[in-house]
Image: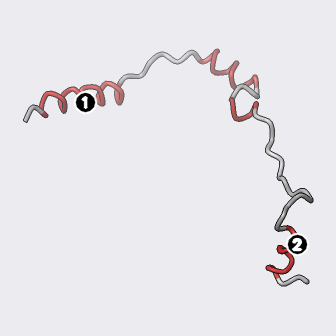
Amino acid sequence: MGRGRAKAKQTKVARELKYFSPDTDLSALERELRSGNSSPEAQRAPVEDDKGDDDEYGDYDKWASGDR
């Protein structure tokens, strides 16, 4: 019991989100797209693959793959 009011509120919010179209600042969007590296993913340093000689199981890689 008591679910009707909560469901009605959720329906109202969902309807507002579906049909509400806010004014888009196209000039701000254009500036963001032109800047290039504005996203956090683009600003991260690339991950280097650590395949150094300090691999304690490196000798077993050839044996496990059949290359002896």
Q: Is residue 46 above or below residue 11?
A: below
x and y, in percent, of residue 15 in the image: 29, 29
Q: Is residue 7 above or below residue 55?
A: above
Residue denoted by label 1: 10
Mark 2 Cα shell of 10 Å, populated few (<14), some (14-19), many (≥20): few
Disc 2 marks a residue whose amino acid type is Asp
Task: Name, please, the residue furthest toward the front.
Answer: 56
Q: CA distance from mark 1 to mark 2?
A: 60 Å
Q: Quadrant of the C terminus?
A: bottom right
- Spot the residue most to the left: 1
Please state if 31 lies on the left or on the right of 7 as rendered: right
Q: Quadrant of the N terminus?
A: top left
Q: Secondary structure at mark 1?
A: helix
Query: In the rendered view, does 29 fall on the left or right side of 66?
Result: left
Is the residue 38 above or below the residue 66 in the image? Answer: above
Please state the horizontal and vertical placement of residue 53, each as a whole percent of the image. Answer: 92, 59
Front residue of 61 and 15: 61
User: Does 54 sit above or below residue 6?
Assistant: below
Q: Quadrant of residue 47?
A: top right
Q: Which residue is mark 2?
A: 59
Disc 1 packing (10 Å; few <14; some 14–19; many ≥20) = few
In front: mark 1 or mark 2? 2
Q: Amino acid at mark 1?
A: Gln
**Residue drawn at point x = 48 percent, y = 16 percent:** 23
Percent coordinates x, y for residue 64 in the rendering? 79, 79
State the image coordinates of residue 54 (x, y, percent, origin top left): 89, 58
